[in-house]
Image: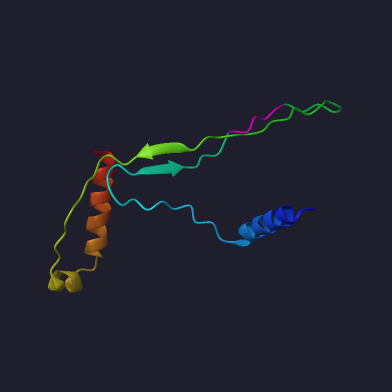
Amino acid sequence: MSRYSRDLQETVRRKDKEPFDNTTEIKKQGDKVYIRTIADVTVFDHQKGMTLPKQRPESPDVEMLIDKGKGWNILLDDVDKVQSDIDLLNKFTDDAAIICLAA
């Protein structure tokens, strides 16, 4: 085994143990996000003695261009925040997010 092979194997082993962060930070419009997908698996009817079909599920990443933006700005008085039995800021933010998704 060459030194290169040992180094490569050690690097792969180390990478397998490191946590993998699959988040993409969106900094501005025009950025691209790559969304991993999961391939569909084909299910078949099985009969005793049959040769099992082989499959290699593959699924390409989906590329999404961030080319639109929405925003909102919420002002909430401290008195309203304290006197309400509803978490108004979170409720307003949830509503705004739903409106943005529907637009």
Q: Is residue 51 left or right of residue 21?
A: right
Magenta stretch, overall SS: loop
Residue placed most toward the observer, 65 or 9: 9
Total marks placed: 0
Q: Where is residue 44 in the image (x, y as percent from the top left)?
A: 70, 27
Q: In this view, does 55 lie above or below 67?
A: above
Magenta range is 40-44
x and y, in percent, of residue 28 in the image: 28, 48
Residue at image point 58% right, 33% down: 40
> In terms of image quadrants, where is residue 49?
top right
Residue 27: image location, x then y, percent:
31, 52
Q: Is residue 37 above or below residue 93?
A: above
Q: Quadrant of residue 31?
A: top left
Image quarter of residue 13? bottom right
Residue that extends furthest to the front in the rendered view of this protein = 3
Please tell me whether residue 49 belongs to the stretch shown in magenta: no
Q: Which residue: 67% across, 33% down?
A: 56
Q: Is residue 20 left or right of residue 31?
A: right
Residue 35: x %, y % from top left? 45, 42
Who is closer to the viewer here, 25 or 51?
25
Q: Quadrant of the C terminus?
A: top left
Give me the residue at 49% from left, 38% from top. Answer: 61
Q: Which residue is drawn at 85% across and 28% down?
A: 48
Q: In this view, does 1 lie above or below 43?
A: below
Q: In the figure, is residue 48 to the left or right of 5? A: right
